Image (cartoon, rainbow, N blue to C red):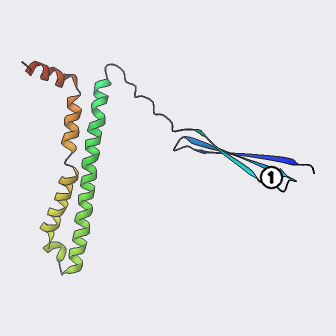
Amino acid sequence: MDTKETKTTTTSTNPVAGTSTKVTERTLQGSADAPDVVVIEKTGGKKKRGKRRYSNRLKEAQQILFPLNRAAERVSDAVAAGITVWRRESDKSSRRKRDGAVKDLTDNGARSVAKIVRKSSLAPLDVSKAMRRTRLYRSIVRSIRF
């Protein structure tokens, strides 16, 4: 009995994860007792991020911008969540009673402001961490020490 071997190779890539998978399938034809063989190899891995590169003069300014950006994003997300709460609660009030959105304006407003304050409470900490990294801050701290 003569055997014939067929080999099929398929490669798939995931650009988001930075990985690729290679699937090799070997089929032995003409042999009843030999099963099909599938080999799966994972090639590559997660792509490493490169280090941030700065010029000497602008390094500190750029390093301050990242935490400040995070703080601004935190505040804007909090405002969006607060407006969503206000809209949802005023809709609920208007369905429950006549002129409910107007009657419950202060309650709904208080709920939305509470949500904004809760979600944006860590923004000042982000700003203070950004300032703590500066040379000016370190020189002030050194001058205060006895």
Camera-side residue of 46 and 106:
46
Local packing at callout 1 (Cα closer than 10 Å; few below 14, some 14-19, many 20+) is few
The quarter of the picture where the C terminus appears is top left
Q: Which residue, given by chain and number where applicable, does mark 1 sit on?
A: 34
Q: Is residue 108 above or below residue 50?
A: below
Q: Residue furthest left?
A: 146
The residue at 17%/63% (across/down) is 111
Q: Is residue 47 left or right of residue 102?
A: right
> Residue at point 19% right, 73% down?
101
Residue 22 location, quadrant: top right
| Residue 69 placement (x, y as % from top left) | 29, 40
Q: Residue at x 31, y 35 (%)?
A: 66
* Location of residue 49 in the rendering, given as x and y in whole percent from the top left corner: 45, 33
> Which of the 4 image quarters holds residue 80?
bottom left
Is 17 left, or right, of 93 in this rendering? right
Task: Tally the marks.
Answer: 1
Q: As drawn, is 20 to the left or to the right of 104?
A: right
Residue nearer the viewer, 43 or 126:
43
Residue drawn at x 25%, y 66% as measured from the top left = 87
Numbered disc 1: secondary structure: loop
Residue with the most extreme front position: 33
Where residue 142 appears, as percent x and y from the top left, is 13, 19
> Considering depth in this image, is 135 or 65 the residue closer to the camera?
135
Question: In the figure, is residue 100 to the left or right of 34?
Answer: left
Name which residue type carries label 1: Ala
